[in-house]
């Protein structure tokens, strides 16, 4: 069964209440499908602010699907729960080819980051066609490889402002891709957990030195999967500060209004 975001049941609050991991704030949510140029249908969700302008758009690229990554990986799920209401930010999430989640399964199969180029292009094209402004790629783990490999070349480069990378392993992305980002001049913010399994802050700083405009930020205590509300909130705050500097900072930790609770 395909999950329908309209199934969230919102109830009024009796006053400000803490925002927890499963708290869903109001937004305009819809199931979407992306069509790739090589014939695949990718399933996803778009979450928009209920009112007011869209200040920025996050096009999220999830972790490795062969190791449990999908559009509901927790940082991206929390972004969709919170950022439309707290920061006026649109969040586009989708399953890359062959990836399954409660939303459904995208057609095709995992292609080691090669065929996924068309997935990135389809997501960006969808955001452009919808008129969503101030578009940023946000990649996590495997998703950072896709952002680095395809974000600084056409047709994507002209349609995005820059990218945020969470826990980049730099396995598939090479120095050539880093040089393409350097030549693009587009902003690149790299959040690197202190205890990452693949690339830790000192090595990341050395590798990303090829990109003069890259900002490498080591996050003390964090691990590759950003487990824990403290680290998820840190990531969301850093993303908002970059893509929408006029938004309230840090993000509120309480909400006075209707909320729903997501299934764990």
Image (cartoon, rainbow, N blue to C red):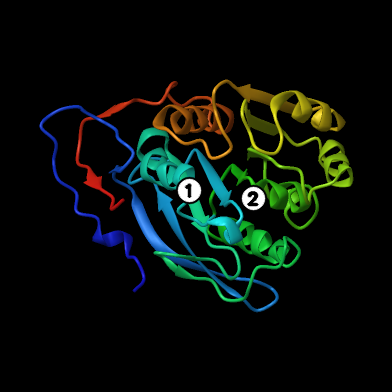
Measured as percent of width and height from the top left, residue 168 is found at 68, 40
Residue drawn 67% across and 32% down?
190
The reply to whether discs 1 and 2 touch (Cβ–Cβ < 8 Å) is no
Residue drawn 41% across and 49% down?
48
Q: Please give the residue where the numbered disc 1 appears in the rendered image.
A: 91
Q: Residues within 10 Å of mark 1 (few under 14, many from 20)?
A: many
Q: Which mark is residue 145?
A: none
Measured as percent of width and height from the top left, residue 214 is found at 75, 29
Q: Secondary structure at mark 1?
A: strand
Measured as percent of width and height from the top left, residue 251 is found at 40, 26
Residue drawn 36% across and 44% down?
81
Q: Is residue 81 above or below residue 110?
A: above
Q: Is residue 92 above or below residue 179?
A: below
Between 171 and 208, the residue placed more toward the observer is: 171
Quarter of the rendering occupied by the N terminus: bottom left
- 6 horizontally vs 120: left or right: left
Nearer the observer: mark 1 or 2; the answer is 2
Q: Please give the residue where the numbered disc 2 appears in the rendered image.
A: 143
Measured as percent of width and height from the top left, residue 197 is found at 65, 37
Residue extending farthest left? 14
Q: Secondary structure at mark 2?
A: helix
Between 261 and 230, the residue placed more toward the observer is: 230
Total labels drawn: 2
C-alpha span from label 1 to label 2: 15 Å
Tell me where residue 25 sits by quadrant: top left
């Amino acid at each position: 069964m395909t999950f329908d975001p309209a199934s969230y049941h919102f109830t009024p609050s009796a006053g400000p209440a803490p925002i927890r991991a499963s708290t869903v704030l109001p937004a305009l949510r819809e199931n979407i499908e992306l069509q790739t140029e090589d014939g695949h249908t990718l399933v996803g969700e778009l979450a928009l602010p209920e009112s007011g302008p869209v200040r920025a758009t996050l096009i999220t690229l999830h972790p490795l699907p062969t190791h449990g990554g999908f559009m509901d990986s927790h940082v991206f799920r929390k972004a969709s729960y919170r950022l439309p209401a707290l920061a006026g930010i649109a969040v586009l999430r989708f399953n890359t080819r062959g990836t399954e989640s409660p939303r459904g399964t995208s057609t095709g199969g995992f292609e080691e980051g090669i065929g996924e180029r068309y997935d990135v292009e389809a997501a960006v094209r969808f955001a452009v066609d919808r008129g969503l402004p101030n578009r940023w790629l946000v990649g996590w783990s495997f998703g950072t490889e896709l952002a680095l490999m395809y974000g600084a070349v056409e047709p994507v480069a002209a349609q995005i402002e820059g990218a945020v990378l969470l826990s980049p392993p730099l396995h598939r992305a090479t120095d050539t891709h880093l040089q393409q980002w350097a030549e693009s001049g587009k902003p690149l913010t790299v959040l690197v957990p202190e205890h990452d399994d693949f690339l830790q802050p000192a090595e990341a700083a050395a590798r990303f030195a090829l990109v003069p405009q890259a900002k490498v930020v080591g996050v003390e205590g964090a691990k590759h999967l950003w487990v824990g509300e403290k680290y998820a909130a840190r990531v969301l705050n850093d993303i908002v500060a970059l893509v929408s500097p006029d938004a309230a900072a840090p993000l509120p930790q309480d909400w006075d209004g209707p909320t729903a609770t997501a299934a764990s």
